[in-house]
Image (tube, rainbow, N blue to C red):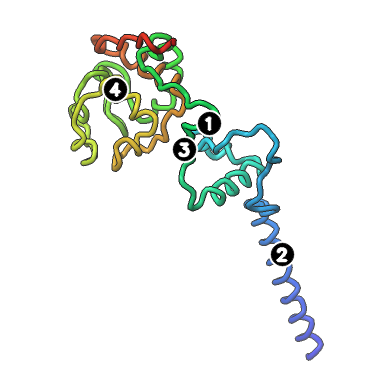
Amino acid sequence: MNRMRWLVTGLCVAGAAGALWSLNWFAGQLYPNGDAGTLAYKPGEDMPPRVDMASVQRDWPASLGDPGEGRRLIAYHRDMRGKAPALASSAGGAPAPAPLDLGTLLASADANAGKAKMHLCASCHAFSQGGPNRIGPNLWGVVGRPVASHAGFAYSPAMKAHGGSWTYDKLFEFLASPARDIPGTKMSFAGLRRPEDRAAVIKYLASLGNGGPPLPAPSPQAGQ
């Protein structure tokens, strides 16, 4: 009887150990932790100076399918803790980039390219005349209309309190980072980092409706 008891006890211990090992192995496949928190590239390699969070959000979860990308994001996050954004020095070094001119960007923007970009927004917005409100308001005729004014949509208190109109400049700022431009907005879109992409989207939006306000003229100093 004692032999049977020891045999059963041994089998139970072996089974528990096997189950724990299997669970640990499975967790390792889901969350690889080899070299966790280390850079997945050599400092000398030509890598972007920062992680493009907008791209990570748009491509989620495929954006972190490669373990190296996951480690790179972890390392970037740890490296940035407590750091203020670096400011360009006006004395010495590379000269500061020239300020963007929205008139010049819009003049060269491709509305068709903007329309292609708008597939990112199609799940939340409709663009047709008389189309429904979805998670976000219908964007037909949005350029030039007052902020938070589309009938039938429940805007956030932050958007209602913002005031003003959707001018070209305002749309350009908002589309760069909605949450940063209007804190408290319900719009969860990360934004379009490239100014050329924002200009193309705005030019397409201006074509919806009875025609938006005239495009701003390019600055004479923009090409100098």
Of all residues shown, which one is farthest toward the right?
3
Q: Which residue is mark 2?
A: 21
Query: For mark 2, does the 10 Å Cα neighbourhood hold few (<14), some (14 to 19), or many (20 or more) residues?
Result: few
| Quadrant in which residue 18 is drawn | bottom right
Q: Amino acid at mark 1?
A: Gly
Q: Which residue is mark 4?
A: 139
Q: Are marks 1 and 3 in contact (CB under 8 Å)?
A: no
Q: CA distance from mark 4 to mark 1?
A: 46 Å
The structure residue drawn at horizontal position 24% and vertical position 12%, both measured from the top left corner, is: 213
Residue at the image point whose x is 19% and y is 25% from the top: 146
> Regarding mark 1 in the picture, which secondary structure is present there?
loop
Which callout, 4 or 2, points at the residue further toward the start of the chain? Answer: 2
Residue occupying the far front of the picture: 91
Q: Earlier in the sequence, mark 1 or mark 2?
A: 2
Residue for badge 3: 87
Label 3 to label 2: alpha-carbon separation: 49 Å
Give how far apart the Cα atoms at labels 4 and 2 are: 54 Å
In front here: 15 or 70?
Answer: 70
Identity of the residue drawn at 68% across and 67% down:
20
| SS for dot 2 | helix
Specify the amino acid type for callout 2.
Answer: Trp
Question: Which numbered disc, 3 or 2, marks the residue closer to the eye?
Answer: 3
Q: Which residue is mark 1?
A: 92
Instruction: Identify the mark nearer the N-term, 3 or 4.
Output: 3
Q: CA distance from mark 1 to mark 2?
A: 58 Å
Residue 132 screen position, x and y as percent:
27, 25
Front-lying residue, 112 or 191: 191
